[in-house]
Each structure stands twice: as C-alpha cells, then as structure tokens.
Image (spheres, helix red, strand yellow):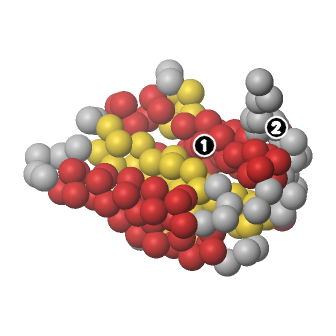
Amino acid sequence: MHVIEGGYATPRGRIALVAARFNGQIVDALIAGARDMLLRHGVADDAIDLVRVPGAFELGPVAARLAAGGRHAAVIALGCVIRGATAHFDYVAGAAANGIAQAAQAGRVPVVFGVLTTESIEQALERAGTKAGNRGADAALAAIELADLYGKLGA
C-alpha cells in the first residue's frame, strides 16, 4: 500500500488568517497561537495576511474568496461562538461551520476550521491558550499539513 500524507514543510506562498472581531479577546489569542505556529514552521511574518471580519457568520464567504483568489497556500478561519440564552448560538455556529466547509470544498487550497463553539467563556479561554492548548495553533498546524498534502496530490 502506498500512503500519501502531508508533512510539516514550510508552505510555499502566503497564509491567510480570517478572524472574527466578535469575542475579540478569545479570537486574538487564537490569532497569536496560529501566528506562532506558522512562524515556528518557517512561514515568514510578512507572508501572513490577517483579514478581519465582524463575526463568525462572515468567516465562510471571506474564506471562500481568499481560497479562490490564488494568492494563498492555505486559509485559516478563526472565531469564537459562545452559547447564550437564545437560539442565536445554533444559527451562528451552524452557519459558520457550513460556510467554512463550503469554502474548503470549493477551493483549490486548504481552508481550515478554527472556530471555537463553546458552552461558556471559561471553555473558550481554556481552548485559546490555557488548560486545553490553543486551537488557533492546532488549526495552523493542520493548514501546514494540508498545504503539503495538496501539493503532493497535485491539481
């Protein structure tokens, strides 16, 4: 059996981080984690584009435009949706997941889901760099691996 999998070689080209401004304290920690991981894997700081959007709902359409634009080796969508007392969480979290999934399926480059969907702000803080690691860093590592895999799979 011939196994094909991505590695952790420095991606060729730019990396886009699409980040929501809503829940900014959490998302800024995800951005910092993603940026740190990219730098540790040889991506130059000036090869990272940070694109800010209002909230998680807007991540998918902007990620799709970036993935289709041909300027980036990978796109990483970062956001945070925290459950509240209304159904708003379900609509926004679902729309964000669907939009990012559609962008990933339509694009020729990897689009990675780095959106926290948590029950509380405490859970979000844990996943943005405290007890449970940093999911922004995890998303960046996945983007590096997938960019390498896409290169190996070819057009």
Locate residue 82 relative to residue 4 in the image: left or right: left
Query: Helix, strand or loop at disc 1?
Result: helix
Screen quadrant of the C terminus: bottom right
Q: Vertical placement of 80 versus 142: above or below?
A: below
Residue picked out by circle 2: 8
Q: Residue, x 84% and y 63% (percent of image)?
A: 13
Which amino acid type corresponds to the residue marked 1 in the rendered image?
Answer: Ala
Is any atom of residue 27 visible in this view? no
Which amino acid type corresponds to the residue marked 2 in the rendered image?
Answer: Tyr
**Residue 9 in the image: x percent, y percent?**
87, 42
Residue 139 is marked as: 1
Between 42 and 103, the one lying in front of the other is 103
Between 73 and 81, the one lying in front of the other is 73
Screen quadrant of the N terminus: top right
**Residue 133 in the image: x percent, y percent?**
56, 27
Between 137 and 153, the one lying in front of the other is 153
Q: Residue, x 75% and y 73% (percent of image)?
A: 71
